Each structure stands twice: as C-alpha cells, then as structure tokens.
Image: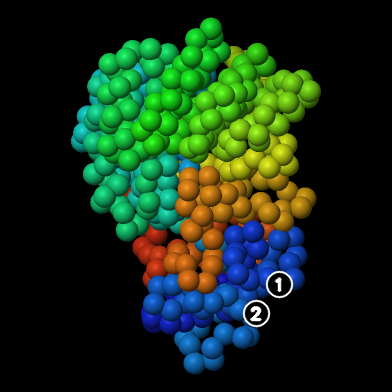
Amino acid sequence: MTYSFISPPNAGRFVLSNATLPAAAVSGYTAPAEEGLVRADIVVADGLVSAVLPPGEAPADYARSDLKGGMAWPCFMDVHTHLDKGHIWSRNANLDGTFMGALEAVRVDREAHWSTTDVRMRMEFSLRSAYAHGTSLIRTHLDSIAPQHRISFDVFDDVRDAWKDRITLQAVALFPMELVADAAYFADLVTVVRNKGGLLGGVTKMGPDLVWQLDKLFRAAADSGLDVDLHVDETDDPGAETLKAIADSVIRNGFQGKVTAGHCCSLARQDDGLAQRTVELVARAGLSIISLPMCNMYLQDRYPDRTPRWRGVTLFKELAKAGVKTAVASDNTRDPFYAYGDLDPVEVFREAVRILHLDHPLDTAARIITTSPASIVGRPDIGRIAPGGPADLVLFSARRWSEFLSRPQSDRVVLRRGKVIDRSLPDYRELDSVVGA
C-alpha cells in the first residue's frame, strides 16, 4: 500500500496531519501518550515547524498530507562514528573478528593506503549514506597517529564545510593515551585539534601512568578550551577500571568542559557493588556515556569455537537511572572493527532496543538517537520536533512500536527544511577504485 505522505505537498506551507510522534523527541506539545507515542498535526511553514497541534486543529487552508497514523521523528544524531575507517573491509579484513585483529588490520591499512583522496572518498560515501537515512549530525573519531592526524583533519575540515548545509560534523582526535608522553607529538596534536575546532580523545588503558596521562589530557583540554571524548574499557576484563579513573580525574582537575566516554564494556563485567560505585562517580563527575551496541556485540567475548556468553554492552539502564546522559551510536562501518552497518540510526535504534532491553515500556526510548545525543554534543536545539525549529523530519508508515521495530523502515521519507530529499543510497561500486571490488 502506498501512503499519501510519501510525497508531501510541494508548498512553502503545509500540514502533516494524523502523525504519531515519539513524545520524548517533541518539545512544546503535550497530549495523552500510549507507550510514549502521541498523535498530532505538524504545521510546516517556510522550512520550519511553525506548530505542533492536536489532530484536526491545523489551519484548514494549508495544503496537507495525511500520514494515516504514521510516525514522524526528528532527524537523527549519530555521535560516535569512525568516518576515516569506513568501508576498508574488502581491502583489509579482520579475519578472526577479534579486537586485536581489528587493531592490526586498521594499522596495516592506514599505513599502506590512507591518503587525502582515499580518506575523502570513503568519508563522502559514508555521509551520503547517513544523509539518505535521515541523519543531521555526526561526530566522528579520527585516527590521529602522526602524520595521519594532519591528513585526516585536513580532509575532515574540507568535508565539514562541503556538508555544512546537510550534516553538522564534529571530529575527535583518537590516539593511544600513552602518546601524551611524547611532548612534541601531543603539543602538535592539540594545536591541530584546536585549529580545526575538534575535540581531544584517546584510548585509555589500565597502567601505572594512567592517572598522569589523564591529568595531562584534561589540563591540555582546559588550556585550549576543548571538550573530551574518550574510548573507554572496550574489553571483557573486569579489572579494566579506566572509567572510574576518568571520573576521578575530571573531579580532581575541576575540568569544566564536556566529557564523553564511549563503550565502557567492562563495567558490565564487574560485581554489582563496584559497578554501582563507579556509576555514582560518573554521575558526580558529569560524564556522558555512549553505548555502541552493534559493534560491541560483534567484538566482545569473541573466542574461537566458543559461543559468546554476554552482550558486550555497558550498564546503560543503571547509568541512565543515576542521571548520566546516555545515548547509542553506529560506531564503525564495514571496517575491521565492525564488518557491517550503513550509518543508519534506525538500525542502531532497533538493535539497541533488543540488545539493551530498552522495551517494555518504550516510553522514552526514542531519546537515545535524538534528544539525548544532541544534548551530549552541545546541540540541544536540534534532534527534536519543536515549534520554531527546522522541519528536518523522518516520516514512517509504521504507526506503533511493533510495526516500527519489525521492519527496517526502508520506505521512510526524509524532509530537510520541509523539502523531500533524494534517498538514493550510493553504490558500493563507487569505492572499487580505492578499496577494490
């Protein structure tokens, strides 16, 4: 069956009537909700949402599309990705699927192939996919081992400008934390990140120098006015407690910037008492946590000829209950860390609901790819349907959660500034010249 909303009116002013909205992603409108879903008419004028009204109360003289109960979401936020690594699987696969295998495969590929042309082609391909799926903001971590950090950040700077009217882009410098001991390298990296308007990142590991490394990182970030986004405890080792060390360092240094921690897998492997104390410390330090359910389930607890025993994800519910800002994201795409994916937040959401048991009820689940990540990355003005905000919307024929979560929603319609975009996905053959057929 073809729904009329597939082609919203080609007009400056129109109404999307009989829409079902996730209440967690709507501002300035309240109505009786059923499992977090509300019915409304969305009034669009000159590219903006001018009003969200009870069904039937929109202006009668506006053109309209009847969604027949179909869902309308704000465009999505994907706040932990790796655009520089994307789509290299066919060139350097991770043959055993392990974390260490991924590290080595990426190192080999980076040293052999990463150039301005190579990185840009793969990055643009990823962005075209994300845009077609309905994403309006992406934060990407960029491998920042010298001299690669200059290539990746220069490419990113160009791409960010080229895409500024379609996807807002943020970049994080990703490097092994032990490299903060290399004074010349670290000073140069901080300068590059500051000049490119990025964030400091890093991969934390347990060790005798961890406290010193973190303190130096946060002092450098404070001196340069930079926020921090770290890769944390991406392991099934319950002895990995760098998340606790990060929270301690934030408090000890009085760091005032935003601090985000991704992964935090080992937290779910620790005994309840220890884990709860860390959760409380994370809340006190004001950290935000990003879970990467698809990649973590792929990599964690992978051993030859053995069925995995756990899901690889962090204590998402416990962190949220403690008041910690939490969200989910894509992470890697068709590279040695995750062989699959297409930077589609709907896929991430559907898998997160299943893996993290975010259902029964689903009242606030929509926040994890909309309002929560937008707040975490400092853009609370987007990722929600709100009067006065941009008419950046994703429309679905699904009317309720059981319909939404049972199909990939490949027939969705994406509006940017009230206009329907072309949702054609790029052909993988376009990458043959750089990654091989």
- Is residue 49 placed above or below 96 in the rendered structure? below
- Please, is residue 264 above or below residue 131 in the view? above
Can you tell which mark lies on residue 54? 2
The one nearer the camera, 351 or 263, is 263
Three-letter amino acid code of the residue under disc 2: Pro
Q: Which mark is residue 31?
A: 1
Question: Quick check: can you spot residue 61?
Answer: yes
Q: Amino acid at mark 1?
A: Ala
Could you tell me which quadrant the N terminus lies in?
bottom right
Residue at horizontal 39 percent and vertical 22 percent from the top: 175
- Residue 316, located in which quarter of the rendered image? top right
Q: Which mark is residue 321?
A: none
Tell whether 1 sits left or right of 308: left
Q: Residues within 10 Å of mark 2 (few under 14, many from 20)?
A: some
Q: Splitting the image into 4 quarters, where does residue 105 fall?
A: top left
Pointers 1 and 2 in contact (C-beta within 8 Å): yes
- Tally the numbered discs: 2
Residue 91 vs 333, above or below: the answer is: above
